[in-house]
Amino acid sequence: MLLPDTYAVNARGHAEVGGCDLVDLAAEFGTPLYVYDEATLRNRLREYRDSLARLYPGESLVLYAAKAFYGLAMARLVADEGCGLDVVSGGELFLAARAGFPLDRVHFPGNNKSAAEVEAAAAHGIGALVVDSVHEMQLLRALDGGARVRAMLRVSPGVKPDTHSFISTGQLDSKFGFPIETGQALATLQELLAVPQADVVGVHCHIGSQVFDLSAYPAAVERVLDLLVEARQASGFVARELSVGGGLGIAYTDVDDPPRPVDFVRVVAGAVAEGCRQRGLELPRLLVEPGRSVAGPAGVALYTVGATKEIPGVRTYVSVDGGMGDNIRPKLYGATYQALKAAAPDAAPETTVTIAGKYCESTDILVRDARLPRVAAGDVLAIPASGAYQLTMASTYNYNPRPAAVMVGGGEAHLIRRRETYDDLLLTEA
C-alpha cells in the first residue's frame, strides 16, 4: 500500500509507475516532479463508492476532499467517477466551476467563510454549504432576494482520535464545529432552521486526519445520532443527509499498516445503519469525505541529488532540488517518509543518509536516516506516498518556483501542472 497500484520494476531495473519509467520522467519533465498514477486515484475512489453502495442500505455519496490534491485534471477525474467534491474555499469552488464539475455534488465546509464565498455558494447552487459559525448564519440572512441555500451544520462530537494533535478536529477544544456535549450544537441547529435562506438538509462531523484506529468513528456516530434524536424531539427536524467526514490514514513507510477504504466504509456504514435502526431514525444519505487516502498513495515525488555533506561519525546529508517548498509536512507535522533510488529500487541499502532540501532552513529535512544504495549527484530519488497535502501546501519560499505534476497511465504521461517560472513569481508584484 506504500507505492501506487501500478508500481513495477522494469527490464532496465528502474522504478516505473503507470508504465512510465521514473528516471525517464525526471529527464523529460525535470525535477522536482510529482507523478500521479491515474489507476490508483480511480481505484481508491471506486473502492469508497462501490463499498458504500454494497454496505450501506440507503443512498450515499463520496465527496473527495479537494484540499488533499486539486486541479482541473483531478476535478474532472472525480466527476468522471461519479463522486462529489468537498471544497473549503472560494478558490476551490471557482476551480470546480471552471472544470465543469456538477456543482450539485459540491459541499463547502470551512470555519470562516467570507460574504463573497457564501454568495458564490448560493449563486452556484451547490450541494450544501456546511455552516460552522453564527457569523455564517448572519451572512446567509443577508443574501439578496429569495436566495435559498442547501445547508448542513458542522458539529463536534467530542471524540479525539489517535492521531497527531495538529490534525485532530473532533474534540471539544477545536476551532471546527459546534460542540454536542455543551448543548451548543442543538441550540445552533434550531437557530439555523429559523434562517429563511437555509434549506437545512443535515449535519456534518469530521474527527481528524491520518486515522488508523477506526473505533473512534462509531463513537462519533453515536453522539451525532443522539443529537438528531434530540433535534427531532425539539423541532421535528429529520436529517436527510449525514456526513461522517473522512480522515483515513495511509502508509508513509513500510512499517505503516492502515485500514483499507472498504474497512472504513464497513465501520461507518454499519454504525449509521444500526444506530438509526435503534433510534427509529430515517436513514439519511450517507456522505464520506476521503482525501489523503485517495490522492496520497497515488503520488510519487521525484528529486535530483546535488551536494553531499559528510560529517564523520555524525551524519551524511544528501541534498536534493526540492524540500519544504513542495513538502512542508516533515517540518509541520514531523511526518516520516522513506525514499528509493529510481534507477535501482531493489538494490540493497549500503548507507544511511539524511535527505535534505535546498531551502535556507536547517529544519528543511525530507527523510532522516534513510537507508539507500550509494547515491551521487545526478541520481533521481523517489519518495512514495507524496500525493496528498504536498503540492496543495506548496510555497514559493526563497522565491523558488513550485514543481510540475504529471498524470501517468498506460505508458503515457500527461502534464497536468506546468512548472512555475521566475516570471510567474512576479505576476502579483505591483
Image (spheres, grey):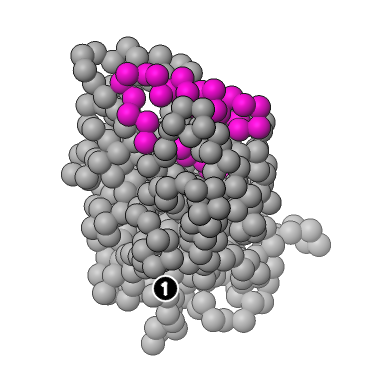
Residue 285 x, y percent position in the rendering: 38, 49
Please give the residue where the numbered disc 1 appears in the rendered image: 5
Q: What range of the chain is rendered magenta?
A: 179-207
- For residue 16, what is the image quadrant? bottom left
Between residues 190 and 372, which one lies in front from this camera angle?
A: 190
How far from the left and from the top, in percent, is residue 133?
49, 22
Disc 1 marks a residue whose amino acid type is Asp
Question: Which residue corresponds to the image point at 25% horizontal and 41% vertical from the top-left?
Answer: 104
The residue sitting at 39% across, 87% down in the picture is 11
Magenta highlight on residue 200 = yes
Look at the image and say whether residue 3 sits in the magenta stretch: no
413 above or below 420? below
Q: Judge left or right: residue 352 versus residue 147.
A: right
Residue under the image location 42 percent in, 39 percent down? 239
Placement of 91 over or under 273, stated as above or below: above
Q: Quadrant of the C terminus?
A: top left
Q: Residue 213 appears at what percent x and percent y?
A: 64, 58
Above or below: residue 398 compared with residue 413: above
Q: Nearer the viewer, residue 334 or 163?
A: 163
Q: SS of the residue at dot 1?
A: loop
Does residue 405 show up?
no
